[in-house]
Amino acid sequence: MYGARVSGNVDQNWRMGVLNMHTMGDSLRPAQNYTAAAIHRRVLKRSTVRALLLNRQAFHDGDLISDDYGRNASLEFEYLSDDGRWRGKASYNQSFKFRDSGNGRFLIGAFGYNGRQFQTNWEFQHMGDDFTADMGFISRLYHYDPGNDRLVPEGYSSIANLTDYSIYPKNKKIVQHWFGMENYGWWVRGGLLNEWYTRLRYFMFFKNTSQLRFRLNNNYVHLLYPFYLTEGAPLPATAYNFSEFNIELNTDLRKKVNLEFFGVYGSFYNGKKATVSASLNYRAQPWGNVALSFEFNDIRLPEPYGNAQLWLINPRLEINFSEKIFWTTFFQYNTQANNFNINSRLQWRYRPMSDLFLVYTDNYQTEGMFGPKNRAVVLKLNYFFQI
């Protein structure tokens, strides 16, 4: 129904922002009011203390519904050394819901070192079963239980590490060799290892902007509930260990025609998976860009778990009629969603950072009888001003 936002620097050390929006209710959902308030304080030379408050409150016929709300409060300190090499973070987040059990906290700690050749970063998290964020997205908290057709919150503890080492040879063609390792682990239900992911990688960066990347990935997953990967039987809720190798290549990005390729092959849960994706790009200076991209996934599992072949095809066209008028159109064919989509946008930048958009979107059902699902035409005006 309405919304407003104000943000900016109060002075050299303080920054703040406040946003409020109110939505109209209907027969399925009451009206909602959303508020977000943030304040930042610069401390030391390059460090920051941040506070954030979020509030979602339901209303019915203008009256507040006392037991229908979701609130979050966060306090965070982020340290950055004077030379920018050392960094650290400590964050406490608490959510509030009507009749929760009080286990709605989310703790984060991190530290790292970023040098020219050597970098390492570590992060630790702990999330309670009752933590929620009505004004945001929470990864990994909810697990789908197909037997009871419901989402089950599962709090977790996690650790993550990225460590890299670079070599800069005195070579006319190669400017950097990049070696790295990633590790991610998640524990649930008081100590059950839910997933452990390890990646080894080696990248080569060439002077002509082309890149060649190799990765070896290993994934251990303990499914908490049966999992449908294909139209066959669901995978049992047990532990799986699988590995894959991938290679990625992009040619000289400065050329009018360049190619991006990505290939993966390896084990996948109790079966095999192969992935191939590629993008052919043509830059017609100065007026436009044309790109044709696709991705194909071939999943093969033993009986009775089934197989799946999934295609994603998405050509894209960008035309610049002038320095102020642009037209972008892309198509997407997705066999996993059984959907064909058209999105076309005409943009007029009539003044700096202010635009008029005319957008047309169309979706078609591709399984069974081909036909339209929904379409829309949207006109959007954006005007930027400073106070």
Image (tube, rainbow, N blue to C red):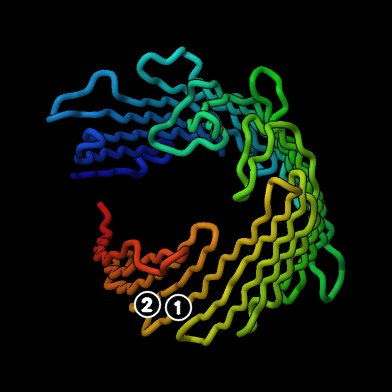
At horizontal 47% and vertical 63% (from top left) the residue drawn is 367
Residue 123 vs 349, above or below: the answer is above
Q: Residues within 10 Å of mark 2 (few under 14, many from 20)?
A: some
Element marked by disc 1:
strand
Residue 122 showing in the rendered view: no
| Nearer to me, 69 or 289 | 69
| Nearer to me, 355 or 317 | 317
Q: What amino acid is found at the position of numbered circle 1 in the picture?
A: Glu
Element marked by disc 2:
strand
Give how far across and how far down residue 3 sits, in percent. 23, 44
Q: What amino acid is found at the position of numbered circle 2 in the picture?
A: Phe
Give how far across and how far down residue 154 sits, in percent. 57, 25
Report the residue that reaches farthest toward the left. 61
Q: CA distance from mark 2 to mark 1?
A: 7 Å
At horizontal 42% and vertical 15% (from top left) the residue drawn is 100
| Nearer to me, 47 or 315 | 315
At horizontal 69% and vertical 35% (from top left) the residue drawn is 236
At horizontal 42% and vertical 81% (from top left) the residue drawn is 319
Residue 109 is left or right of residue 361, and the answer is right
Q: Which residue is mark 2?
A: 326
| Nearer to me, 52 or 279 | 279
Report the residue that reaches farthest toward the right. 170
Give how far across and how far down residue 376 sits, in percent. 28, 64
Residue 302 is left or right of residue 90, and the answer is right
Q: Which residue is mark 1?
A: 318
Q: For residue 32, which quarter of the picture?
A: top left
Q: Residues within 10 Å of mark 1 (few under 14, many from 20)?
A: some
Q: For residue 265, which quarter of the picture?
A: bottom right
